[in-house]
Image (cartoon, rainbow, N blue to C red):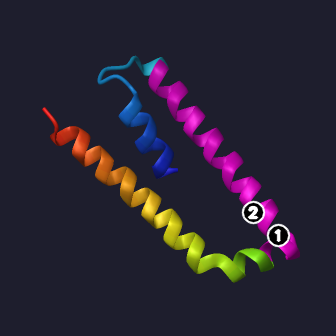
Amino acid sequence: MAFYAAVFSAAAPAHVSLGTFVSMLAVVVAVSMAWNGMVAIALSQPRIASAYQGRKKAIDRQCGALILSLGVRQLVKRAAP
């Protein structure tokens, strides 16, 4: 859920009304619950779970590299004049 909160905080204006903030928070919670629910359902299938376990290390590395590159991009954008 922290990932979605970070995305929304980066995309939202600096000062939002309470209603907007609550709506954004509700969307973050709903998207997070939906995503995690879909992942849980998918990984509860033996065939999918087995395929994931076989490729877990590569998937984790790719996801880590993606998250790292997004972080570096944010740093570069903030450092630019």
Disc 1 vs disc 2: Cβ atoms closer than 8 Å?
Answer: yes
Local crowd size for mark 1, using a 10 Å CA cut-off: few (<14), some (14–19), many (≥20): few
* Residue 22 locus on image (x, y percent): 50, 27
State which quadrant residue 49 falls in: bottom right
Q: Please tell me whether mark 1 sits on a helix, a strand or a loop.
A: loop
Q: Distance between the residues labelled 1 and 2?
A: 6 Å
Q: Which label number is shown at residue 44?
A: 1
Residue drawn at (79%, 80%) of the image: 50
Query: Over which residues does the magenta segment extend?
Result: 20-49
State which quadrant residue 56 falls in: bottom right
Q: Name the one closer to the observer, 37 or 69.
A: 69
For this orientation, the residue located farthest to the bottom is 54
The question of residue 42 being in magenta is answered with: yes
Q: Which label number is shown at residue 40?
A: 2
Residue drawn at (74%, 54%) of the image: 37
* Residue 9 locus on image (x, y percent): 38, 35
Q: Is residue 69 above or below residue 56?
A: above
Residue drawn at (23%, 45%) of the image: 76
What type is the residue that disc 1 sits on? Answer: Ser
Q: Is residue 57 above or below residue 16?
A: below
